[in-house]
Image (tube, rainbow, N blue to C red):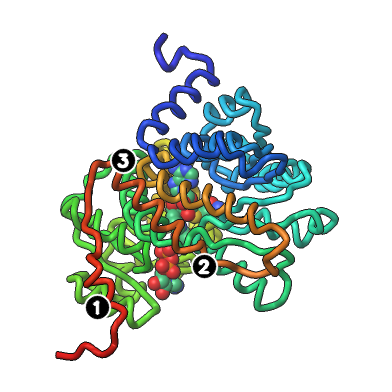
Amino acid sequence: METEDAPLTEVGERRIEWAMRSMPVLRAIGARFADTRPLDGLKIAACLHVTAETAVLVGALKAGGAEIALAASNPLSTQNDVAAALGGYGVEVHARAGVDIETYYRHIHRALDIGPDLVLDDGCDLVNILHTERVELLDAVTGGCEETTTGVIRLRQMTAEQALRFPMVAVNDTRTKRMFDNRYGTGQSTLDGIVRATNMLLAGRTVVVAGFGFCGRGVAERARGQGARVIVTEIDPVKAVDAALQGYEVLPMADAARAGELFITVTGNRDVIRGEHLAEMRDGAVLANAGHFDVEIDVRALEGMAQEVNFGVRPYTDEYVLADGRRLLLLAEGRLVNLTAAEGHPAAVMDMSFSAHALAVAWLAEERGRLAPGVYEVPAEIDTEVARLKLEAAGIAIDELTAGQADYLRSWRAGS
Ligand code: NAD
Ligand code: SAH
C-alpha cells in the first residue's frame, strides 16, 4: 500500500519503526527496562513533542512498567499519524497538530488527569499548570525531567522563589543532550524546516542568526556550510567574541535587520526582532524562529504593520504586506520552524537526548522520596553511559586511560 493511501495509524507505525532504526541506544535501554521494570506501577504525565522519536522514548518507558499519558509541548508540532499509532499501542495521547492555545492547554490538563507520580516536560508548561491550576495533584508527584534550555531556566527561577514542589532533573544540561541535540539537531532541522517551507536557496544568502548559544552555533555552522553569509547577533559579550573569532560578522539587530535576507532567532528570549527591525527589512525577507515559544519575533507588531496578510502562500509560510509594498514572510507562525515545517531533530540525535531522558527517569524512580525539591543535574555516569553505548552502536572504539595516566591526572606533585 502507498503511504498516502494507508490509514493514519499505519503511517505512524512505519514512521516510528523508521525512527527506531536510528535509535540503537534507546532500543537497548528499552530492552533493559523490559527485564528490570524500573518503572513498574508508576504513572507518568508527559508534555513532549509528539513525534516518532518521542514514541520510541514512550515505548522504552512503557517497557519499564510505566503507564503514560502524553500531551504535546507545542500546538503545531504533533505528528498526527504518530499520535494515532501511539493510541494503538495503549498510550493515552492528547495532541493534534494545529490546535488553538486553549485546546493546547486543555490537552495538558487531560494528561495530568492520570494523576502522575512522575512528570516529563519540554518547556515547563506542564509543571507550570501543575503548580498553578492543578495543585491538588502536587502531593503525589515525586519528581520529573525537563528536556529543554528554557524549561530549565524556568525551573531554576521557581527554585529560587521556593515555588517548585518536587525534584526536577535538567536533562537539557547533560553533555549528551546539549552538545548534540541543541547544536547539530537544531542546526540541521531548522534549515530543513526553512527549506521545506520556502524551497529557498541558502547559498549566497545573508542569514542573520540571533543568539550564539548551543542552538545558534549549530544553526550558524550549518548555514555557513550551505554557502550562506552569516551574521550573528548577541547580548552576551563572551558569546559575541566567540562568534567573531569563528569568523562570523557580529552586528546589533538594528544593523543586521537591513542586511539580512533570512532571519533565524534561537535565543529563548522575547522581542528579539521588533517593529523597529521589521521596518528596516528588505522586501522578501524571511523570518523563522527555532527558540522556545512564539515570542522571539514580535508577531503582534508584524500584524499591526501589515496592510494585508496572505496566509499559506506555501505551507507554513505567511506573507505580510507592509504599507510601502514590502513583503515579509513569516514561517510557522513564529513557532519552532524545525518541528512545524520539518520533523524536528533526526532520530540519530534524539537517540542520545531521549536515552539520557529515559535513564534520568529510572534514576528518579530509584531515588523517589530521597530528593528535596529543586533542579538536579543528570548523574555524570548516565552521560558517559549514553555516549559509550552510542559509540558501541556506531562501531567506534576509543582509548582507555592507562593506570599511569589515571595516576598522573590525580597527582599534584608531578611538575615539569
Ligand atoms: P543558550 O542559553 O545556549 O543560548 C541562547 C543564546 O541567546 C545566549 O548566548 C544568549 O546570550 C543569547 N541571547 C539572549 N537574548 C538575546 C537577544 N535579545 N539577542 C541576541 N542574543 C540573545 O540556549 P540554547 O540551548 O541555544 O537554546 C536556545 C533556545 O532554543 C531555548 O529557548 C531552547 O529551549 C530552545 N531549543 C530549541 C530546540 C529546537 O528543537 N528548536 C532545541 C533545543 C533548544
Ligand atoms: N515547548 C517548547 C519547546 C522548545 S525546545 C516550544 O514548543 O516552544 C525544543 C525541544 O524539542 C528540544 O529541547 C529538543 O530536544 C526537542 N526536539 C527536537 N526534535 C525533536 C523530535 N524529533 N522529537 C521530540 N522532541 C524533539
* Foreground residue among 280 and 36: 36
Q: Residues within 10 Å of mark 1 (few under 14, many from 20)?
A: few
Q: From what the image shows, is residue 209 above or below residue 313?
A: below
Residue 346 percent across, percent down from the top left: 37, 41
Q: Residues within 10 Å of mark 3 (few under 14, many from 20)?
A: some
Total residue callouts: 3
Q: Are marks 3 and 2 in contact (CB under 8 Å)?
A: no
Residue drawn where x is 60% and y is 43% of the image: 72
Q: Secondary structure at mark 3?
A: helix
Q: Secondary structure at mark 2?
A: loop
Residue holding disc 2:
270
Q: Amino acid at mark 3?
A: Ala
Q: From what the image shows, is residue 258 above or below residue 337?
A: below
Residue 199 percent across, percent down from the top left: 29, 39
Mark-to-mark CA distance, 3 and 1: 31 Å
Q: Amino acid at mark 2?
A: Arg
| Marked residue nearer the N-terminal end (1 or 2) | 2
Residue drawn where x is 47% and y is 47% of the image: 354
Extreme residue in the front direction: 403
Image check: 384 left or right of 138?
Answer: left
Residue holding disc 3:
393
| Marked residue nearer the N-terminal end (3 or 1) | 3
Residue holding disc 1:
408
